[in-house]
Image (cartoon, helix red, strand yellow):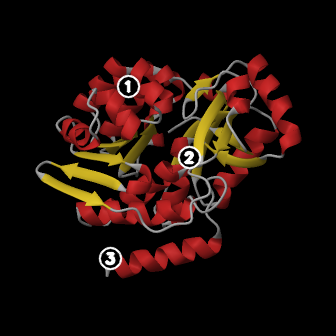
Amino acid sequence: MGNALTDILAVLPDDSFLRQFHLPKGSMQHVDMETGDRIWQTLKPMGVQYVAGGSAANTITGTAIFGMKSGFIGKVGDDELGHLFRSDQEQYGIKSTLLKGKSSSGRAMVFITAPNAERTFAVYLGAALELGPDDLKPEYFHGYDYFHIEGYLVQNQSLIRRAIEMARDAGCIISLDMASYNVVESNEAFLHDIVDRHVDIVFANETEARSFTRLDDPKDALDEIARHCSIAVVKIGKDGSMVRQGDEYHYIGAWPADTIDATGAGDTYAAGFLYAHSLGRTLKECGEVGSIIAAKVVEVIGTKIDIPRWKAAKQEIRELLK
């Protein structure tokens, strides 16, 4: 379950555009419709790419391509972006529960800046923000082994609580992607509460892990997160990732890649990790499968891996898991 957003991708030569709109580099900022439209009008002449996205939706697209039965819960507007989002999920065989909102469909304007292909987001949530606890039905969760949720939904804490309750009743393993360091900072108490009480698997990057634990060292942060859930994963960018379950710890090196855009790397890593976990593979293998598939998405602009790279990834994963 997540925000049903269309990513509007723009590759920028430097940080001047970010400064113009007061967007801290590497952050995720919510904008109102007026600001979103101003950014959009300025972006258009630069050339952009449209991709159906949203953190949880990216992860679920990956699990669907791996062959897992996958579903998605979200809300869109009755407009072109909403139709694009729906058709994109149908294309991958995802069972979408896309409810209709009153506002226009949400969009995430993604700015990719040199030298490290760092991503900065300006997000207008629109109809996605209208998804509420009363929209949920127990049958949406039946028949699934995992319930994956993105931290970007924390603007509606009652929605998350109701969803987790229904997922637990359906017997799901619950995984959470923390989403963004500023999301963690502004919702720290709530995130600690649900991780302590309900979440089985936590995915975080370095800055999110630091914000959640207030520990500077990523390894120390990993250890602290693992005290509060079953499995903790901290992604450390080009340096790979670290995973811990109880006393078991593994450092996973990054898979070789020619990086041009880091958008969606963490979402795709989660897809690979959950896929391997569903097969009952070891903790180390789960991290390695995540690393393999994340290496493919950073070689393309946006979050959609092309067919040749998917074929290569599946072959590499078969070799790893045989």
Which comes sooner in the sequence, label 3 or label 2? 2
Residue receiving disc 3: 321
Please determine whether, in this image, residue 235 is positioned above or below residue 213.
below
Q: Is mark 2 on a helix, strand or loop?
A: helix
Q: Is residue 294 left or right of residue 166?
A: right
Residue 47 x/y as whole percent: 84, 46
Badge 1 amino acid: Arg
Please determine whether, in this image, residue 87 is positioned above or below residue 316.
above
Badge 3 amino acid: Leu
Give me the residue at 37% from left, 49% from top. Answer: 146
For the residue pair 62 and 267, the one nearer the viewer reads as: 267
Residue receiving disc 2: 57
Cβ atoms under marks 3 and 1 closer than 8 Å:
no
Please determine whether, in this image, residue 13 is positioned above or below residue 109.
below
Give me the residue at 27% from left, 29% from top. Answer: 213
Residue receiving disc 1: 161
Residue 322 x/y as whole percent: 31, 82
Badge 2 amino acid: Ala
